[in-house]
Amino acid sequence: MPHVIHPMRKEDIPQVSEIDREAFPNQWPPPNYKNELQNQIARYIVACEEGAAVAPERAKDASCIIYRLLPWLKSYPSSPAPQPEPYIVGFAGIWVLADEAHVTNIAVRKSCQRRGVGELLLIYLIDLAQKLKNTNLTLEVRASNTAAQSLYRKYGFIEMGVRRAYYLDNREDAVIMSTENIHTDSYQAFYRQMKEAYALRWDNQLPVS
């Protein structure tokens, strides 16, 4: 099923936090995404499953009680019912540090993995970095997370070093990875080919750089 990307909103925070807890159960303290949305250097995006939605919780306020006790009030105009929220399957973010875009996280629901969502989020982060005139993207990834490292290498990230005992939960090393200058002709040609291959494989429309 195709996926669509949009900037993270405050309404997305409950689902994003749920995905974060599932993807990073040992991370402490968890990010405060409300603060991150107000962070001037942060940019976050979410991936939604096209055509899927989450039903909003029913409001439990005094008006509900009054309606049950006084049925005749139902004839009066009421406020519109809350609309379903898009079903978020993943999210990602960057911090803009001078001319560098630092990838803070990419996370996908376990039930929605192996559908190209993580790769789609990475593509949109690269596009975002290009629009923001960032020179390159950098990140840290767990030494044991070979699947993520493989995805990053696929898009031109190379290993730049290691941060020893970087992760507090188990003292695991982090591999530092970075792209070359994403505005060079060589990277632009390479990146176009990668996006075309992704669109062909997953039948998902992608932004034009």
Image (cartoon, rainbow, N blue to C red):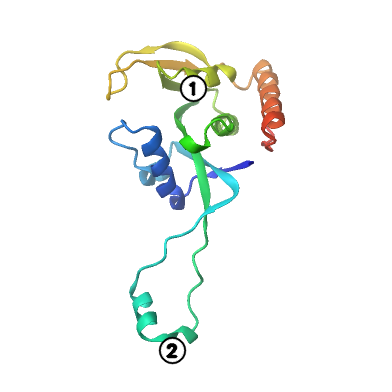
Give residue 9's position: percent from left, percent from top.
47, 49
Between the residue at mark 1 and the residue at mark 2, the CA separation in whole angstroms equals 59 Å
21 with respect to 197 (left or right) = left
Q: Secondary structure at mark 1?
A: helix
What crowding class fits label 1: few (fewer than 14 Cα within 10 Å), some (14-19), or many (20 or more)? some
Q: Determine which residue is flagged by label 1.
A: 148
Give residue 33's position: percent from left, percent from top.
38, 43
Q: Residue at x 42, y 65 (%)?
A: 58
Give residue 90's position: percent from left, percent from top.
50, 38
Which quarter of the image is occupied by the N terminus? Answer: top right
Asked whether the viewer can see residue 92, the reply is: no
Q: Residue at x 49, y 58 (%)?
A: 55
Asked whether the viewer can see residue 67, the reply is: yes
Q: Residue type at mark 1?
A: Ala
Dot 1 or dot 2: first in sequence order is 2
Tell me where residue 26 sits by quadrant: top left
Q: Which mark is residue 127?
A: none
Q: Secondary structure at mark 2?
A: helix
What crowding class fits label 2: few (fewer than 14 Cα within 10 Å), some (14-19), or many (20 or more)? few
Front residue of this view, candidates 18 and 180: 18
Tell me if label 1 and label 2 are in contact, CB under 8 Å.
Answer: no
Tell me where residue 115 sits by quadrant: top right
The mark closer to the camera, 1 or 2, is: 2
Q: Residue type at mark 2?
A: Trp
Q: Determine which residue is flagged by label 2.
A: 72
Give residue 25's position: percent from left, percent from top.
33, 33
Q: Residue at x 46, y 59 (%)?
A: 56
